[in-house]
Amino acid sequence: MSVAKTCVHRGRRNGMLVALGASIIVLLQAFVAILLARYIFSHPIVRNTLLRTGIVIFGILAVYFFIAAKKNKVKEVEIPKHSGRKSFAKGMLVALINVLPIPYFCALSAAFNVSGSNTNGWVEVSLFILAAASGTFTALYIYVVGFDRIQNEPRNFAKYSNYFMAALMVVLVAITLIRMLYGKT
């Protein structure tokens, strides 16, 4: 969402720099996630505690995004000229603060490890983190390309993106509950 907001407030070029900065941080997050997955999935108590914590966090986020969508106040802004260095740093900072990809990449890492041996070589780890970063950049690039539609209707974008995030959090709560109730413990 920060990429789209940056495009609206600072232009396309700065939106691309936010996307690039965020993708660089995703490289590090994916690597950390692989290391965490090895530990988490070999300790059932840790896994169950994280699932319970996730339900609470996703529930709080769902309520927050729903309330934010209801308030929805958008001001008219003019796009000023800015240097790209600030946007690049913003992308890195926002991605660094956003730790939600780490559990996601942990789950992906565990899903790809079919044998259960938790022995991933450097080639597999490198390919995984490069795929995560390039996938992130591609998704954010699509936001930048779709910037024109967003710019014409910023109120609808803010409203519906918050509703989308609220719905996503509800889905994550449901999936986590199902995993806890019917999964292996």
Image: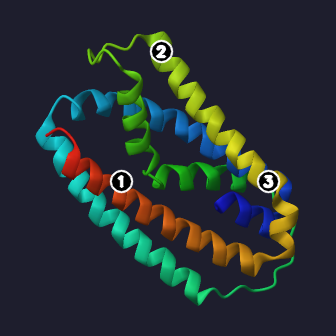
- Label number found at residue 124: 2
Residue at 65 percent across and 33 percent down: it is 134
- Label number found at residue 156: none
- Toward the front, the furthest residue is 182
Residue at 43 percent across and 33 percent down: it is 108
Quarter of the figure with the C terminus? top left
Q: Residues within 10 Å of mark 1 (few under 14, many from 20)?
A: few
Q: Amino acid at mark 1?
A: Ile
* Relative vertical location of residue 163 with respect to residue 136 in this rendering, above or below: below
Q: Earlier in the sequence, mark 2 or mark 1?
A: 2
For label 3, the SS is helix
Q: Amino acid at mark 3?
A: Val
User: Where does residue 17 sit, x and y in percent of width and height?
Assistant: 74, 48
Q: Image check: 75 left or right of 148?
A: left
Q: Image check: 139 left or right of 183?
A: right
- Label number found at residue 175: 1
Q: Earlier in the sequence, mark 1 or mark 3?
A: 3
Q: Earlier in the sequence, mark 2 or mark 3?
A: 2
Give the CA distance from mark 2 to mark 1: 28 Å
Q: Residues within 10 Å of mark 2 (few under 14, many from 20)?
A: few
Residue 112, located in which quarter of the rendered image?
top left
Residue 90, located in which quarter of the rendered image?
bottom right
User: Where does residue 148 sit, x and y in percent of width and height?
Assistant: 88, 63
Give the CA distance from mark 1 to mark 3: 30 Å
Residue at 33 percent across and 28 percent down: it is 35
